[in-house]
Amino acid sequence: MSLKPNKILLYSYNVYFGDCFLLVFEYEDRNRTVLIDFGSTGKGKPHGVVVDDDDETHKETTGHRLRRVAQHISQVCGENGLDVVVATHRHKDHIYGFGLKEAGQIIRDCKPKIVIQPWTEDPDDNRDLSNKTSRVDAEAFKNDPRKSFTSMLNDMHLVAESIETEALNLADSGVFKDTIATALKDKIVFAADDNKIKNRAAVDCLHAMGAAEGSASHYVYYGYDQIDWETVLPGVNVHLLGPPRIEDSSEVTSATSTSDEFWSLQAMNQYFWGLQAATNQTVSHQEGNTPLFPRGKTFTGKRPDNLTWIIRQLRNVRASQLLQIVRYVDSALNNTSVIMLFEVGDEKLLFPGDAQIENWRYVLNKAKSDNALRKLLNETTLYKVGHHGSRNATPKSLWDGFEKKIVPNRKSEKPLKTVVSTMVGKHGESPDTAVPLPLMVETMKAESDYCSTEDLKGEEYFQLIEIPIA
């Protein structure tokens, strides 16, 4: 008789603004565990705290919280360690903890047997991030859509790093008398920090875990079938529903803010991002405060009032452009998110990372003609809310299709569970763009058994959801 879990435990960790979930499948012989993401962009430091978030000893830092979470994960896993680690995509709020010295080591010591990342993280398709060399020549990268796209994503990380530096400079009162608004600076820095190359330590950690003895790395996409799930998670059907590959759907290379196309990645092509990345490297390697044009004449007198006003307005325009660019980078990375659905008995647990509409559209279009796939999605019993509750990561057609929702005049002994890891005030400027989206929260509270990390109080840092298997 084949093994089958009799219960699932879901630990939802409060990592401030980020995702970290531990699935525990309880069997008669031993538990199997799946860690989905381990990241954070932090909560912001209280007044007077000057330590870095990387400091894992100071109780006010993100590093300290993630170390505490890692210790709990290790305790839950016990001597059997982790069976699967999933890093849905490269954003800091999903993988930052893997790169921390102590927290990352604790997870590595759990010796995961399988490490899952999106296909865009395959080293064979990525050029080295530090010196831009490649395993094949540059011409091969340019002519191969898959390699060209992944290389472009790497260039975007370098651009995000330079944007953060420029935003901090525009807000520095020691440099400019009239700086850009603090709120605008904070939005740029928050989005840029989530995308910049600083996540390299986490990326390296994930690759190292997958290359360790007794482990294997899998770079997955829609329909990926190279994992023997019956050996890893007996009695559990695991469906990999995203991201699509470029050959499956070119839409994955686009980023939209609405249902209409916003800004095509094809237009912002390899040459644009490569040029910006090269510029970033040139500027970052300048020593001291060496002027870019050392022989140029410098105006040192008092500027006329009208000129001062124009300069200030141009500075604000530049900052707004930076915010647009870095948000585009953010969306491009979200479109590479892994989408997983775990099916055991009558339970179907859907974890989509930060997948946005371009990623979702592929599977939803297939579901229109694939009855089995449509049934699988519609019968979802637990939904991990995409992108911390943003408006662009839970397609309305997906939500409308969920059959387990609470609806008037219909009894539901086991309603749909929705789980979100989020933090108010980190994203968005209006009720229409806020994360989590107020309307979405209101709807999910009314139509599902809603659970948010924001409900945790005091020293609580995780929620436990028990799911018995019928």
Image (cartoon, rainbow, N blue to C red):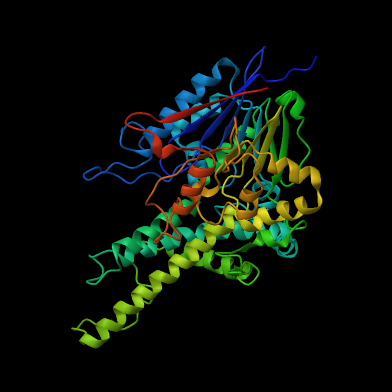
Q: Nearer the viewer, residue 269 or 427?
A: 427
Q: Position of residue 460 (x, y in %)?
A: 37, 29
Task: Please say if 393 is above or below 465.
Answer: below
Q: Which residue is drawn at 38% across and 77% down?
A: 293
Q: Which of 338 and 349 is in front in this view?
A: 349
Q: In this view, does 186 lie to the left or right of 204?
A: left
For residue 313, which quarter of the picture? bottom left
The answer to whether residue 285 is visible is no
Q: Position of residue 185 (x, y in %)?
A: 34, 62
For residue 375, which quarter of the picture? top right
Q: Quadrant of the N terminus?
A: top right
Q: Position of residue 93 (x, y in %)?
A: 48, 45
Q: Which residue is drawn at 77% across and 53% down?
A: 368
Task: Please say if 451 is above or below 255.
Answer: above
Q: Where is residue 308 in the image (x, y as percent from the top left)?
A: 25, 82
Q: Which of 50 and 390 is in front in this view?
A: 390
Q: Which residue is drawn at 47% across and 43% down?
A: 18
Q: In which quarter of the image is the C terminus?
A: top right
The answer to whether residue 182 is visible is yes
